[in-house]
């Protein structure tokens, strides 16, 4: 029943084109007000793999692995193995429902001189839903679902520096064609791309061999998506991710990595209305390029609110003998921008060609729909070992 209630509200908002909240408010009341940025297909922003999930959703500058497609495809140019595949599974929102799930498959093939091709498929199932009319009579059963398929190409641009581009197809079917009011819903379709950069450098720290890496990714740059013919289109969750890591090799058996990521949605912030006039912020009904540029300075509360739109991830990863890993991390989002705050922990076990990873999420609030979230990933690294000389 909870799932039906939440999904019904979401569908009604889409079909009735309720994309903005209009309120009577003065500019003096902007400080501290809740003003969450929303977009279509938010499943694209959910962490799909267990390694990153165990480090507070950290991933743009971590060492490359088979799941780098989501975080920064440019990392594939420096991956050690020639070929790899990863399969991940996440039971989602288990505190609310028991049949929402995320499946993620990613893989890569690296060539000589640091060129690599990669691909991934993400499938989000929202469980079984029974639609009813105003009298409570059953209309039909349906299983809402969304998926995204993408391919990427990465290459080394100069010593220690690589770049990548990715192309993504997005499909979102939330209603199965159910009509509401005078509107008929249809699946949403979109095409988007990513641009990624990665820099890595081996250094000495306290006389020990170490590494510093930095990453930048702008993801989901694409057309707006619509679920009805007569409604406004909605922005994709275009996102800028920037971060760095420091890896310290304690000795030949033990290593420790520290990392931090910052994320900023490049989507217009909802303005403040008085009647039909905008009294603070900017008009969100703009093109995608304008919306991306505008997102850096359109918050009704000014620069203070803009900084609140940045989420932060910090994480630590410990490896013993390159076989066993312990991970922990923290994710922070401001109270007025979604209020997601949680700790994570994870384990990793690597044996020959395969690696098994596990992650667990611990919210800071006593009740949170994300509590007890689990993630599982199984990775196969195959082929010959590659070198970056």
Image: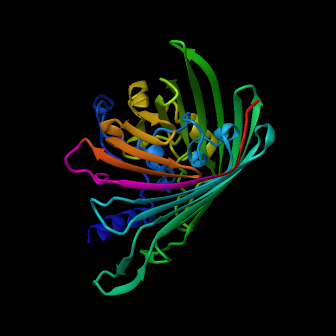
| Chosen colour scheme | rainbow
The residue under the point 55% across, 37% down is 60
Where is 91 relative to 258, above or below? below
Q: Percent position (x, y) of residue 98?
A: 32, 68
377 is within the stretch colored magenta: yes
Q: Nearer the viewer, residue 381 or 184?
A: 381
Of the 4 image quadrants, the one containing the C terminus is top right
Q: Quadrant of residue 80?
A: top right
Most extreme residue toward the top, as rendered? 206
131 is within the stretch colored magenta: no
Q: Is residue 383 visible?
A: yes
Left of 136 or right of it: where is 381?
right
Q: Nearer the viewer, residue 260 or 287?
A: 260
The residue under the point 59% across, 32% down is 215
Magenta stretch in the rendered image: 365-381
Left of 252 or right of it: where is 100?
left
The residue under the point 70% across, 27% down is 160
Q: Is residue 287 visible?
A: no
Of the 4 image quadrants, the one containing the N terminus is bottom left
Q: Percent position (x, y) of residue 375?
A: 41, 54
Q: Percent position (x, y) of residue 251?
A: 49, 24
């Amino acid at each position: 029943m909870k799932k039906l209630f939440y999904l019904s509200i979401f569908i009604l908002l889409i079909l009735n084109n309720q994309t903005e909240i209009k309120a009577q408010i003065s500019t003096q009341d902007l400080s501290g007000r809740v003003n969450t940025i929303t977009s279509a297909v938010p499943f694209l922003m959910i962490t799909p793999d267990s390694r990153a999930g165990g480090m507070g959703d950290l991933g743009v500058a971590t060492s490359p692995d088979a799941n780098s497609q989501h975080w920064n495809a440019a990392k594939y140019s420096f991956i050690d193995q020639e070929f790899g595949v990863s399969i991940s599974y996440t039971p989602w929102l288990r505190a609310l429902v028991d049949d929402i799930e995320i499946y993620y498959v990613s893989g890569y093939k690296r060539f000589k001189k640091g060129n690599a091709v990669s691909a991934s498929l993400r499938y989000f199932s929202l469980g079984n839903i029974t639609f009813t009319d105003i009298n409570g009579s059953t209309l039909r059963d349906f299983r809402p679902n969304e998926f995204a398929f993408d391919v990427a190409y990465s290459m080394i641009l100069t010593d220690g520096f690589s770049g990548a581009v990715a192309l993504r197809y997005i499909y979102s079917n939330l209603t199965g064609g159910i009509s509401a009011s005078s509107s008929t819903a249809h699946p949403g379709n979109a095409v988007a791309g990513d641009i990624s950069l990665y820099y890595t450098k081996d250094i000495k720290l306290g006389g020990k061999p170490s590494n510093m890496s930095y990453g930048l990714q702008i993801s989901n740059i694409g057309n707006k998506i619509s679920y009805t013919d007569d409604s406004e289109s909605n922005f994709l969750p275009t996102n800028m991710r920037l971060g760095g890591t420091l890896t310290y090799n304690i000795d030949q058996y033990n290593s420790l990595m520290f990392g931090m990521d910052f994320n900023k949605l490049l989507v217009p912030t909802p303005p403040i209305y008085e009647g039909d006039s905008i009294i603070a912020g900017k008009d969100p009904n703009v093109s995608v390029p304008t919306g991306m540029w505008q997102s850096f300075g359109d918050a009704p509360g000014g620069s203070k609110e803009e900084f609140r739109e940045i989420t932060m991830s910090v994480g630590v990863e410990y490896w013993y003998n390159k076989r066993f890993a312990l991970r922990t991390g923290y994710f922070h989002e401001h109270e007025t921008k979604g209020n997601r705050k949680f700790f994570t922990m994870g384990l990793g076990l690597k044996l020959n060609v395969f690696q098994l990873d596990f992650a667990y999420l611990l919210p800071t609030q006593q009740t949170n729909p994300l509590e007890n979230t689990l993630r599982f990933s199984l990775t196969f690294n195959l082929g010959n070992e590659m070198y970056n000389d």
